[in-house]
Image: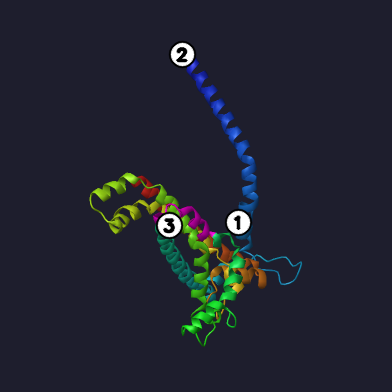
Amino acid sequence: MKNLLKDISRVIRAQKKHGVLVATELKMLLPSLTVLAAISIYPFITMVVMSFYNSPKLPGQIPDFIGLDNWVRMLLDGGVWHSWLVTLVYFILALSLQLTLGIGISLALDQFKKLRGLLTTLIIAPMFMAPVSVGLLWHFLFHDSYGIYTYFLHQLGFFNDISILGNIHTALPAIILMETWEWTPLIAIIIIAGLQSLPEETYEAAVIDGANYWQQLIYITLPMLRQTITVALLIRTMDILRFYDTIMVNTGGGPANSTKILAIRIFEYGFRLFNFGYAAVLGLTLLLVSVILANIFVKVLIEEGEME
């Protein structure tokens, strides 16, 4: 009986101690949770509520509750679907180009071990520029009258009779080039960090077995970099979907909506037409797609980690 009472007393003390620990953890997390609620949770709830209201036509007018009208309108809006198509093309081309160039640059830098620090510092310079500054820089480079890139392209016989940023066939590729120039170094840095963590013993064994550079790259380096590449894709995916600044500086979504990705359309409805309810619906759909893609990448990371 005494042992039973001791056990019960021990359990009660442990529960009280655990409760104190939980209360302490909650107190320590309270400032972070408060900031998170202020900058993330409250705006999200506001967007959800806003999506069920129309926008006031006059200052001081109270918005009317319209239910799912904004959502139905989005599904029937051909312009929105066109923006999703442009976003998809832009997303696939930009991400593929950046990933390919980023891996290539990182592998090249890995061969210059003594100069790797200096060369890495040089290639990451574009990342420190504000996106608006990048947009203005490339706007001058592609300017129809005095752009130096336009001049050289004309001298080579390309795009003689068209404006690169004013043509529906060349505007989006030019925007993708700008984005690639600025953010490929980020993927290269992530891959370089992954390369430095690979075990030397594996490569020494491969050399003894007679594997050349390309065989080592295909059968050792790239498979061992899968998780690193997935992390790089995750980071760039979240960033590309919210890409906005450079397009606004150069084309504003034109010509003929050829560069109007969904982020640009959200800006137009929210801050030019002041239709905040409809802009909230578009923003929520973009957020939903971002969350789905992020979950896919995280799931891939977890599965690869379990396999290893």
Name the amino acid, label 1.
Answer: Phe
Its colouring scheme is rainbow
Say few, some or many: other residues with alpha carbon within 10 Å of mark 1 (under 14 / 14 to 19 / 20 or more).
some
As drawn, the label of residue 301 is none
Image coordinates for residue 114, horizontal then vertical, percent = 44, 52
Name the residue located 42 percent from the left edge and 51 percent from the top edge.
194
In the image, 211: left or right of 24?
left
Q: Is the C-beta separation of discs 2 and 1 under 8 Å?
A: no
Examine the rendered structure and indicate whether residue 151 appears above or below residue 35. below
Main SS of the magenta part reads helix
Q: Earlier in the sequence, mark 1 or mark 3?
A: 1
As drawn, the label of residue 44 is 1
- Circle 1: element type: helix
Examine the rendered structure and indicate whether residue 196 appears above or below residue 244. above
* Residue 113 is one of the magenta-drawn residues: yes
Between the residue at mark 2 and the residue at mark 1, the CA separation in whole angstroms equals 54 Å
Q: Over which residues does the magenta segment extend?
A: 109-124
Name the residue located 62 percent from the left edge and 44 percent from the top edge.
32
Say few, some or many: other residues with alpha carbon within 10 Å of mark 2 (under 14 / 14 to 19 / 20 or more).
few
Name the amino acid, label 3.
Answer: Leu
Name the residue located 40 percent from the left edge and 48 percent from the top edge.
302
The image shows a total of numbered marks equal to 3
Between the residue at mark 3 and the residue at mark 2, the CA separation in whole angstroms equals 68 Å
As drawn, the label of residue 3 is 2
